[in-house]
Amino acid sequence: MPTKSPVPCRLWVLLAHQAGVALIVRCGPARWVELILWETKKDRFQRGQWFHGRIYEERCHLSPDGTKFIYFAAKYGRKRDADMPDTWTAISKPPYFTALALWPGIGTWGGGGLFLDNRCFWRADWPAELHPRFSLHGLTDLLDDGDRIATYKKFLEEEKLFRDPLYLRLRHGGWELAEPDGQSQLKWNRANPIRRGQLLLDRSFSPPRYHLVLTSKRAEPQAFDAEWADWDHSGRLVIALEGKILAGKWNRHKGLYFETLADFNGDRPESIEAPEWARRW
């Protein structure tokens, strides 16, 4: 009888758009989630904290400078702290989950958020008070600041129209709708920020479908498999697939091919305490 291949872990990647770092949210086995900090310039990976519960990846975001992580989590049943809710939105310092700011949730409707700049964030929760054991330490919750509301009026109008959590993150990350006047918010494109070329994303499928559009008129769009793909800070095509981070390359002889930068399938849950600098503002 053939041996069953192990199921690969899942990776969700958040790029910091003003710094050469990204945060990898690694899911598996079961309800275990690991954070990994990725220095994209040197491809160095720092393993961080593990969490046993559910992290809603599409409701997470990384600040532009890569120093803060907002996420939505759920953990039912017995907890270390009796006054902790079953669901919550929190802000931490990557690659650690240890919360520095925390808002109790009311189930899984809503939750999470998005950084509009390095100090101001939008929270997709029902109105909720910051948990009394936590503080913002100079950060601004958009809905609590009348001056900032005027600045981000367009963003708030979009938020009312599109309740899809990933829609706003794609827009904020430089992706554009392929059919801006149409009814569908499923087809997207993103131009290379450094070089020529485009990425096409079709969210009609699960997993999504990606194509690389080259600059040569003779070259056909190159389809490739990926659970996530984007341009990194140097304009390099990077993807997540079957628990691995890969970099894409193309030449006229090989076509599009990928080289493995890291494989996280061997990681196993372990108890990791956040260092002192990650436990305070």
Image: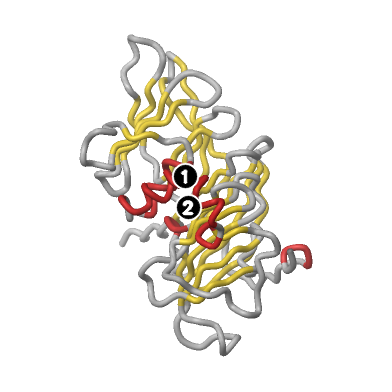
Q: Which residue is mark 1?
A: 240
Q: Are marks 1 and 2 in contact (CB under 8 Å)?
A: yes
Instruction: Locate the N terminus by quadrant.
Output: bottom left
Q: What color scheme is it? A: secondary structure
Q: Is residue 262 left or right of residue 88?
A: right
* Dot 1 amino acid type: Ala
Residue at 55 percent across and 27 percent down: it is 235
Q: Residue furthest right?
A: 276
Q: Which residue is mark 2?
A: 11
- Disc number for residue 118: none
The location of residue 25, given as percent across then percent down, is 52, 56
Q: Residue furthest left?
A: 183
Instruction: Locate the C terminus by quadrant.
Output: bottom right
Residue 186 occupies which quadrant of the picture? top left
Residue 101 occupies which quadrant of the picture? bottom right
Q: Is residue 53 left or right of residue 267?
A: left
Can I make out residue 266 in this image? no
Q: Which one is nearer the viewer's eye here, 83 or 119?
A: 119
Q: CA distance from mark 1 to mark 2?
A: 6 Å
Residue at 50 percent across and 76 percent down: it is 104
Residue at 48 percent across and 40 percent down: it is 173
The location of residue 280, given as percent across then percent down, is 74, 67
Query: Within 10 Å of the Cα at label 2, are there few (<14), some (14-19), or many (20+) other Cα atoms?
Result: many
The location of residue 13, given as percent across then percent down, is 51, 48
The location of residue 94, given as percent across then percent down, is 64, 57
